[in-house]
Amino acid sequence: SSRVGSRAAMGLKGPRRWPWAPWPLLGLVAGIVDEAGRYRPGGDIGDLAPLEPTEEDRNASVDLSKQPIDKIFKLLAYELFREEKRPRETHFGVAHFQAATELSCEERLIDLALDAGRVSEEVHIYHQNVTSTSGLYWILHKYPEEHSWVWLISVSHDRVMRKVENHISRMSALALDDEGLKCMSPGFRTVLMNAIVVWKRMAGDHIALLWNGVAFGVLGDVTSWRELDEDGETTEAGPGGPPPNVSWSENLIFANMWISSVQKWLQHHAQELRHAAYSELSRAQAGQPGEDPGRWLQGKDGALSSFEYLRRQLWGGWQLDKGFLRGLLRHCLQPGYGDSAPVSVADFGAGGGQYSEWLNDTGLVEAVAFDSTASVQEITGGSVQELDLADEVQLWRTFNWVICLDVGPHLPPERARRLFRSVRRHADRGLVASWPSNGAGSPDALNEPAFVALTEVETGFTFDASATELLRQSCDLPRLASSVAIFRRTPPVEL
């Protein structure tokens, strides 16, 4: 065939489908192809350095789709060979670490910011190169036997992962070496933590792509979305001809989309880290005291610290008793259906807001979550409101019910009384609270009779023993099954 003949003319030997290690079979012996796709006889591809483009080159608009197919294959071979010859990514070695630890605090911050900028720029340029090479496969879509794109995806993702993880390793080592948290303030560390959180998600996306590739032979959900218009009707092929084979083209698209998302995040991370370093240096130059890490590392009045809250939020540190929630709906809240207004609930000491989220998802309850952790509103994106539960508060509205699980034992006695007085002010129908008798987190443990007496005195509500027993039987967590209780306002406030 003409294709076989053209491969022989190019000096390409072996089967059309390139193996994983193709280079012994790529005998490009007749000449070289520069980055503009121009073929020149002689020379050695391995030593080729791209020529500086001339003014004529800059003014020319080369349509590669109109170039001879042999030239496109030669250009593709050159790009893949150049990728193969790229130097390996360096790792954060012990020499780099020792050099970094000898830097002053200010120099460390600058070093991290510069390193983030360097990685961002490297991935940006590399992404452009990979995208350009991927475009050649689009031109060659009439030759589906050309499978070297599989290798390109694999090595490009591996290289990007190594670049980012080298930077993450540097961040982690320097943050861990900051004994006593004297150099990196909580604000600066928050920027580093944000980077790790985003990278966790992106690394998970990469693992999902790998899994799809192993399970289905494609990286993403393969659909014929190019062939459908906005109304879901089949469209005619565009001026570029019919779409290429959906399977491999979607693979290239999903692979490049992942690198693009990493590149955009790195750009944001570099800007954020540069701004944080500048703020730290400006504060030091102005002689201002450093940021107090106390509110981030140590909670106030039994509340979780911001960092501990964030750790639980990110790594699954919250418990959710669905049995309790089902019992709460059945034996306490008893919402109506149809056109009935939803039951309103305030969750005091909501933690990650998981109970309020579950209740809201039923569509029968309108729940609002509150917690005392500093900056909880920023950490949760507004899903949990910051409220000092250790002090008497006045919110903008009241609720049918207030939930307060395991909050009282973590407060000093007087502040626990203030909490219950706040509940009385905001609960129209009653309170659902728990107070474990083991007194976890506080030396001021209360047994059940003392807990019931304290709650009734400070709220004016009445303990509902029968409903409490039914609710406890519904609970899955032993801690709630032994301590949760229902208190009702008598008579309830009618709205």
Image (cartoon, helix red, strand yellow):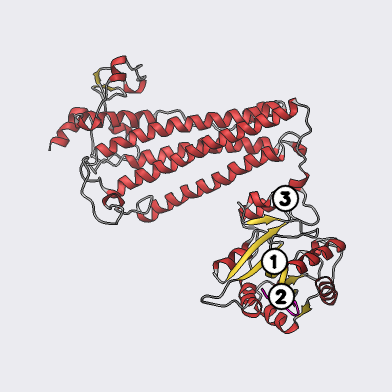
Q: Which residues are magenta?
A: 488-495
Q: Quadrant of the N terminus?
A: top left
Q: Give SS at disc 2.
A: loop
Residue 270 at least partly seen: yes
| Residue bearing mark 1 | 398
Please name the predominant secondary structure of the magenta segment in the image. loop
Q: Which mark is residue 493?
A: 2
Do the numbered discs 1 and 2 sit on residues whose CB atoms are within 8 Å?
Answer: yes
The amino acid beneath tag 1 is: Thr
Residue 408 is drawn in which quadrant?
bottom right
Q: Residues within 10 Å of mark 2 (few under 14, many from 20)?
A: few
| Residue bearing mark 3 | 374
Q: Nearer the viewer, residue 208 or 1?
A: 208
Q: Quadrant of the C terminus?
A: bottom right
Do the numbered discs 3 and 1 sit on residues whose CB atoms are within 8 Å?
Answer: no
Q: Earlier in the sequence, mark 3 or mark 1?
A: 3
